[in-house]
Image (tube, grey):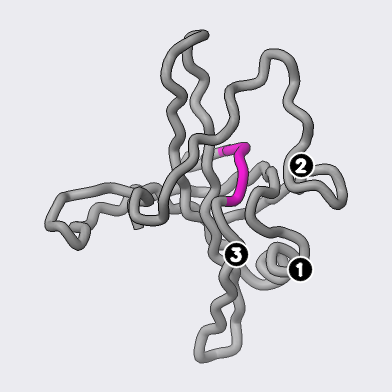
Amino acid sequence: MNRLIIIGNLTRDPEQRILDDGTSCAVFTVAVNRRVAKGAHPQTDYVRVTAWRQLGENVMRYLYKGKKVEVDGPVRAHAYTDQAGTARAALEMTADNLEFLSPKGQAEAAPAEDAPEELTETDDDDLPF
């Protein structure tokens, strides 16, 4: 079985794509913080997500950069070479289910006491795609 469940924050606003046959999808990236030992350097994984049809339309309507979501669906690894010629890999998943976790009107929920550190600030050039 190929199923990934992630919880994280959108790194930027979702992009809508419409295929030649009229089918629409929303593409966005979720930053997922890893649990690390207290005092250790925070680590973040980035997962590119595609949500099709009605789910994609809901993503476009309600999600934007910073919103916290839970996404589950199948995942695949994608290898590529970046502009500098370095071999890289990225995770891509198709959303089967999506839960909006940020309170209405807020980009992020207040973190729990034992929650991981805030997202690591990154530049778009640091993203693997």
Q: Residue at 63% of width from left, 55% of height from top?
A: 65
Image location (x, y in percent) of residue 36: 48, 16
Q: Check if residue 6 falls in the magenta segment.
A: yes
Mark 1: give few (<14), some (14-19) or many (20+) Cα within 10 Å: few
Which image quadrant is residue 113 in? top right
Image location (x, y in percent) of residue 88: 23, 48
Q: Which residues are magenta?
A: 5-10
First of labels 1, 3 by sequence position:
3
**Residue annotated with mark 2:** 101
First of labels 1, 2 by sequence position:
1
Image location (x, y in percent) of residue 87: 17, 50
Q: Are marks 1 and 2 in contact (CB under 8 Å)?
A: no
Where 29 falls versus 18 (above or below)? above
**Callout 3: helix, strand or loop?**
loop
* Label drawn at residue 41: none
First of labels 2, 3 by sequence position:
3
Of the pair 97 and 11, the residue shown nearer to us: 11
Q: Check if residue 89 falls in the magenta segment.
A: no
Amino acid type at circle 3 is Pro
**Residue annotated with mark 3:** 14
Mark 3: give few (<14), some (14-19) or many (20+) Cα within 10 Å: many
**Residue annotated with mark 1:** 61
Left or right: where 117 falls relative to 120: right
Amino acid type at circle 1 is Arg
- CA distance separating discs 1 and 3: 10 Å
Of the pair 12 and 69, the residue shown nearer to us: 12
**Callout 1: helix, strand or loop?**
helix
Mark 2: give few (<14), some (14-19) or many (20+) Cα within 10 Å: some
Q: Are marks 1 and 3 in contact (CB under 8 Å)?
A: no
